[in-house]
Amino acid sequence: MKYAKLGNSDLNVSRICLGCMGFGNAATGQHSWTVAEGATREIVKHALELGVNFFDTAIAYQNGTSEEFLGRALKDYAKRDEVVVATKFLPRSQQEREAGISGQEHIRRQLELSLQHLGMDYVDLYIYHMWDYQTPLYDVLDGMNQMVKEGKVRYIGIANCYAYQLAKANAMAEKEGFVKFVSVQNHYNLLFREEEREMAKLCAEDNIAMTPYSALASGRLSRRPGETSKRLQEDSYAKLKYDGTAETDEKIIMRVAELADRYGVTMTEISLAWLLTKVTAPVAGATKLHHIDGAVKAVELELSEEDIAYLEELYVPHKLVGVMAQNTKGGSQKEQVWMKNAPKGMQ
């Protein structure tokens, strides 16, 4: 494993971040394909053995059970100060706004619930999961800053935002004396490269770490066309993101397969090796042990400039999909898919 500093922080993170959206109780929350606690523990243990020290979860993942499974596994298999744990909070709900709960108080409540799930006193990276148009930016930054000052959060990150939103937020933070965002977690992979237009340039100039999710396009970049899996069959949200461009995307997927054959490696390794030339640490999910093996091996694979150009050549512009498609004043007011069957504590 190789390691890198997470942007303008002191966090030394593995170049692969284990994404924990695939962990949790499959009977609750957004996804039906998540793995139970026993499998979660095996995957986390194996990742630690391979040098992974960076773990990403969220209070929204399976209504907090992802956090619970991860927290218990890390408690048994790792020392707290040797791992970097990231989690995320949701925007304020309509019920909270009607009850007069401030943005600051909302963040405190979300964090305390996450810490309870994780069984931890602090998180290393606390991530603003989706831009909240119904809450003043000052309140969000102030709330996160308070959590850092109290020692419950070491650094803050942001996800699912535009480059102008990140720049605006960090400018306000600097003006007000608040902590600034050190990382951004957006949708970025070989099939969806819209981040290269502005976000990547901003991050390069300001030393903000990019830790993209959907690094393998929900499994599409790790399998040849026609191959399937439980997730590919059941992940309706991923289908919304990728089915509309499947025809053009398949040409890129075939080039990934071609290079994998040439190098004698997996498609996962090729796809992540490409992404590793662009970002600090892609978030790679895992529901089986071999998923971790492929991700870790990618760190050692070096692609030539010709390989990179070959993989990139056929890309065409894509519309925003998934969470970013809801990054509008109107879209942010709609019910989020991750709130399906949410328990009372997360409303």
Image (spheres, rainbow, N blue to C red):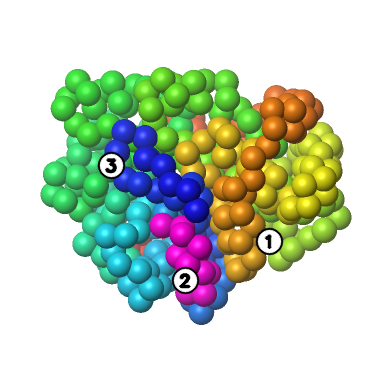
224 to 309, vertically: above or below: below
Q: Which mark is residue 76?
A: none
Q: Amino acid at mark 1?
A: Arg
Q: Nearer the viewer, residue 39 or 240?
A: 39
**Crowd rating for badge 1 (residues with CA inside 10 Å; few <14, some 14–19, many 20+):** some
- Image x and y of residue 250, in percent: 82, 41
Given this view, does label 1 or label 2 mark the residue nearer the observer?
2
Q: Residue furthest bottom?
A: 38
Marks 2 and 3 close (CB-CB < 8 Å): no
Our reading of the magenta stretch's main secondary structure is: helix
Q: Nearer the viewer, residue 181 or 112?
A: 181
Please give the residue where the numbered disc 3 appears in the rendered image: 10
Q: Quadrant of residue 35?
A: bottom right
Asked which secondary structure carries label 2, the reply is helix
Please give the residue where the numbered disc 2 appears in the rendered image: 45
Please give the residue where the numbered disc 1 appears in the rendered image: 231
The span picked out in magenta is: 40-53
Give yes or no for residue 50 being in the magenta stretch.
yes
**Crowd rating for badge 3 (residues with CA inside 10 Å; few <14, some 14–19, many 20+):** few
- Image x and y of residue 226, in percent: 86, 55
Q: CA distance from mark 3 to mark 1?
A: 36 Å
Q: CA distance from mark 1 to mark 2?
A: 22 Å
